[in-house]
Image (cartoon, rainbow, N blue to C red):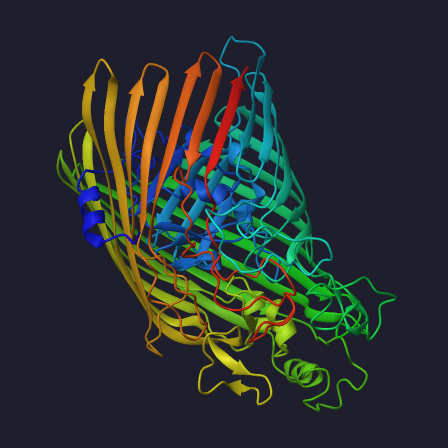
Amino acid sequence: MQMKLKRITVCLALAFAPSAFAAEPPTLPEVEVTAEKLQPLPAPNSTGLDKNNLRHLRSVTSDSASLMRDVPGVSLNGAGGVSSLPSIHGLADDRLRVKVDGMDLIASCPNHMNPPMSYIDPSNVGALKVYAGLSPVSTGGDSIGGTVLVSSQAPVFAAAGEGQLLKGEVGAFLRSNNSAKGANLSATIASESLSLSYNGSVSEANNYKAGGAFKASGVTGRVGHVLALDEVGSTAYATSNHALGLAMKGDGHLVEAKIGLQSLPNQLYPNQRMDMLDNQQTSLNLRYLGDMAWGNLEARVYHENVDHMMDFGADKRYWYGMASGGLVGIAGSGVACGPIGPTCATGMPMYTASKNTGATLKADIALNQKDILRVGGEYQHYTLNDWWTPSGGGMWPNTFWNINGGKRDRTALFGEWESHVNPAWMTMLGVRFERVNTDSGNVHGYNQATFPTVATPVLMHNQIRDAANFNNSVRAKTDNNWDLNASGRYTASINNDIEFGFAHKTRSPNLYERYTWSTWQMAALMNNFVGDGNGYLGDVNLKPEQANTLSATFDWHASDREWGFKATPYYTQVADYIDAVQWNSATNSPTAPLLANQFTVLKYVNQSARLYGLDLSGHMLLASNGWGEFGVKGLLNYTHGKNRTTGDDLYNIMPLNAKVTLTQKIGSWDNGLELVMVDSKKNISDARNEIKTGGYNLVNLRSSYTWKQIRVDFGVENLFDKLYALPLGGAYVGQGMTMTTALVPTGSVPLWGTAVPGMGRSINLGMTVKF
C-alpha cells in the first residue's frame, strides 16, 4: 500500500529529537593548555555512532555501509551483498569522502564493486562519524556531499598495575532468507605499553528471495539452471576479512601499525551485467599520535594493493557465439563450446589492478584557552590498470584496454581555526587547497589489426575510431581545487542549540569518468557504477564539480536529553555537475530525440544541478514503570534533485521516507518494533530511463538479551513478507544473457523495466561472547 504524506507526518510527530542514531557532538582529543580543557568541537550536520549504537545492527547485515541506515539524510544505493554505496542528501559514491582508519580507499572496478566500506566487516567497526554537506576542511576534500569516517576497534592496553591483559570476542550469526551465515573473532593481548590484536570475520549467503514473484522467467542462460520467480538472481556472496594490529604507547605518544587482508571469492550483482569473482586486497597502515606541549600531532602513511576480477556468475549466461547457440541460444541458454575463437566465447574476463599510497600530517595547535589552529597536508598516489583478456566471439583476438596506466595523484594543504568565543558561541573557519593530477596511457580494443592508422567507424563497433580519438587527445589533466567552510554553533538556552554553516566543496572526476573511451554498447555496458543497466563512456575534458551548500540544524531538547527534536534544512547548488547524456555511437554525438523505456549508452558531461531537502529526527521517553522504559524514536528524510541544464530529475534520489521505532528496555532485555515507510519514486531521470518504484511500508522486529559476557540478538526483517522494489536498487539484470540489450524478448536477454526488489521476510539470530 502506497504511503501517504500525512501518515508520515503523524508518525513523525511521535518522535521528538535525536535518538541513538543522532549521537552527542564529537569531542576533540584532550589538549592540556593550563588546568582546563577545550570544549567539544561544534560539528554542524555531523552524526556519531559508537559500538553501543551499532551493536543491534551487526546481526542483521554483513554490509558495513548499512550500519548508517538510521543516520538522518543517509540512504543506500543498491549493489552487492557487502558493498552498498552510501548516499548523503542525494550525493553518493565518489561524491563522498569515505576514510577507513584514516585511509582514502578507492573503488578499483568499472562497476565500483569494491567501495571503501566493503573492506571492513561490521563486527570490526568501532565507530562511525558522518558529516553531511558541511564537513570541516580537515576531514573533507575531493568530495561535495560529505564525509564518512570509519574506525575499527581502537587498541586496548592493560591498566596500570594490571599486568598482562587478554580479552576478546567471538560471534556468529544466521539469517533465514538467504541462508546467510558468518562468524567473527577479535582478540587482544596487551601490557601497559604494548598491544597486539587480531580481528577476523567470514560470511557467506545464497541468493535472497523477494516477498513474492517479481519476474516472468527464471531462465539464467545456463543449461539446467533455473531460478524461482521470487529469487533475486546474482545476490549471493562470500567474503573474509582479517586485520592484525600492533600498538605501542608511552609518555603521551602512540605508534600503531595495522595489516589488512581481504579475500572475496565471489560477490554477485543483481543490477550489474558482470559479477565479482575475485577480489584480493592487502593494506599496511602506520599511524603516530603525539601529545605535545602545544597541542596534538598526527601522522599517517598507508599503502594498499587490489587485484580484482569480474566475469559472469552462476546466474548469468557464460557461453556465447554461434557455436553456443547464437543470440537466442537453446531455450535461452548457451551451450558449452570450444575452442575459443570467432564463433565461440567463454565468458568475458575483466581484470583490474591498483596501487594506492597515501600520507597525512596534521597538527592541532592550542593558541590559547579558546582557540585551536588545525593545519595539515595530505598526499595520495593512485595507479590503475583495467584490461579485458580475449575470450572469443566479439571479444577477440587481442586484449581490450579499458584504462591503461591510469594515474590520479592528490596533494592538499589545509588550515582550520576553531574558536570557543564564549560558552554560547563556537565557530569554525577553514580553507583547503588541493591539486589533482590525472593521466592515462594509450588504449586499444579487441581488434587492432589496422590500428591506429585506419579509423573506419564500422570496424569492430568503432573500437578503432574511438581508440584513435582517445589516444590523440590530451589526457594529462591538472585541477586546482579550493574548499571553504564557515560554520558555527549557538547555544540559545539549555534546551535549544542552532548549528549553521556554508561550504564550498570541489571534486575532480575519477579515472572511469575521464578515461573510459569506447562507444561500443557492449564495452560501455561494462562501465557502470550506478546500477541502472545502461552503458557509460568517459570524457577526458570533464571539469571538477563545485558545490555550494547552505545548511542549518535546529536542536530542541530537554536538559537531560530525555526528549529532543532536530530539524536540518539544506540547499546545495553544483556547478559542472557530472551527469550523462544519451550517446549515438554511429555519429559519435548526443542522441536526439531521447530513447525511452530501454537500456542505452550515455556519455558523462558537465552540467548544473540543484539539491535541497529536510531531515527530521527525534526521540522521547514515553513511560517508565514496572514493565520497563518505553520510548519512541524516528526520522524523516526528504531530498529533491534537479538538473538545471536540462530540467531533468537527478538519478537515484531517495523519495520521501520515514522510520518510527517503539523501544522497550527492561533488565537485560532491549526490544524494538520498527515501522519503515517509503513513498513512491516518481521523479526520475529521463536521460537514463530510470525505473519508477511504488511506495511501501515494512515492519521489523528486534530483541536482544545480555547475560554477563553473552549477548543474543533476535530479529525479523520484513515481518509481513512484503513484495516491494528498492527505490535505489537500480535495474534488475541479475540473470540471463546480460552482455547485450534487447527491445523485445530475445533468448534470455534482460529487458528494461524491472527494478531490483527488496528482501522478503528474514528471521535473524546472532550471538556474541566476550572473554
In the image: residue 79, left or right of residue 577: right
Q: Nearer the viewer, residue 427 or 258?
A: 258
Q: Is residue 476 above or below residue 676?
A: below
Q: Nearer the viewer, residue 462 or 141?
A: 462
Q: Position of residue 689 (x, y in %)?
A: 45, 72
The quadrant where residue 617 appears:
top left
Q: Nearer the viewer, residue 229 or 307?
A: 229
In the image: residue 282, left or right of residue 726: right
Q: Position of residue 623 (x, y in %)?
A: 18, 23
Q: Is residue 659 above or below residue 326?
A: above
Numbered-mark total = 0
Q: Nearer the viewer, residue 149 or 222?
A: 222
Residue 138 seen by the camera: no
Q: Position of residue 537 (x, y in %)?
A: 57, 74
Residue 2 seen by the camera: yes
* Residue at the spot 64% in from the left edge and 62% down from the top edge: 736
* Residue at the spot 78% in from the left edge and 74% down from the top edge: 322
